[in-house]
Amino acid sequence: MSFSKKHLIETKEIIDKLDISQIESLVSSIKDIKLKKGRLFFLGVGGSAGNCSHAVNDFRKIIGIEAYAPTDNVSELTARTNDEGWDTIFIEWLKTSQLRNNDAIFILSVGGGSIEKNISTNLISAINYAKEVEAKVFSIVGKSDGYAANNSSNCIVIPEVNSNSVTPHSEAFQSVIWHLLVSHPDLKTNETKWEQVEK
């Protein structure tokens, strides 16, 4: 079997194993944030940071909810990394933004952070701060045993079907899930361009 065929078969397996009830629960939680005029802060590093930027656009434009990704501000990101350290980039941004209990942070990550392995400690700090101020913690991750999965109000875990492909499947399905969310009739406020043109 070719690699391409195997990868796409795995993709179908993941779809079949996704927990739909968790997705619907996340829809309800996001709707509640919007009704309370709360904000969403998308946090991720590496490829997930790029996904955060795209997600912010969709949540703002399609759902009409106030949303931000700290990694979009390269000047602040690099200043904090240089002056205070990588671990501070999210928590200090959230403090300056006065994260509060009607807001949520939204983690997009492969592993979701690990204290033991010293991975994505900036996400861990942000999660702890969100819980401290009683903000919600949402996440889409690829590991059920990571810090985000164990400390989120709502978490979508991308089922692991191949231990050698956790990263590509996790980052790809971050996009699948957030596009589902912004298209959901309980959240969607504005039509996307091509759907408007076709009508």
Image (cartoon, rainbow, N blue to C red):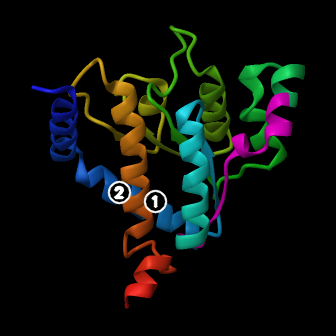
Rendering coords of residue 121 (x, y %):
62, 20
Q: Nearer the viewer, residue 29 or 81?
A: 81
Whether residue 182 is visible, yes or no, is: yes
In the rendered structure, find residue 25 and report the number of the disc placed on it. 2
Q: Nearer the viewer, residue 21 or 52?
A: 52
Rendering coords of residue 185 (x, y %):
37, 76
Instruction: Classify 81 as above or below 170.
Output: above
Q: Which residues are magenta?
A: 63-78
In the image, what residue type sits under mark 1?
Ser
Q: Marks 1/2: CA distance?
A: 6 Å
Judge the density around disc 2: few (<14), some (14-19), many (≥20) Cα neighbours within 10 Å.
some
Q: Residue at x 53, y 71 (%)?
A: 63
Rendering coords of residue 153 (x, y %):
46, 44
Answer left or right for 89 relative to 150: right
* Residue ID for mark 1: 29
In the rendered structure, find residue 171 and report the number of the disc placed on it. none
Q: Residue at x 35, y 57 (%)?
A: 25
Instruction: Classify 169 as above or below 113.
Output: below
- Asked if marks 1 and 2 touch (Cβ < 8 Å), the reply is yes
SS type, badge 1: helix
Q: Residue at x 29, y 18 (%)?
A: 164
Image quarter in which the C terminus is found: bottom left
Q: Residue at x 48, y 28 (%)?
A: 112
Count the marks.
Answer: 2
In the image, what residue type sits under mark 2?
Ser
Quarter of the image for residue 11 reads top left
Whether residue 136 is visible, yes or no, is: no
SS type, badge 2: helix
Judge the density around disc 1: few (<14), some (14-19), many (≥20) Cα neighbours within 10 Å.
some
Image quarter in which the N terminus is found: top left
Residue 76 magenta-drawn? yes
Residue 71 magenta-drawn? yes
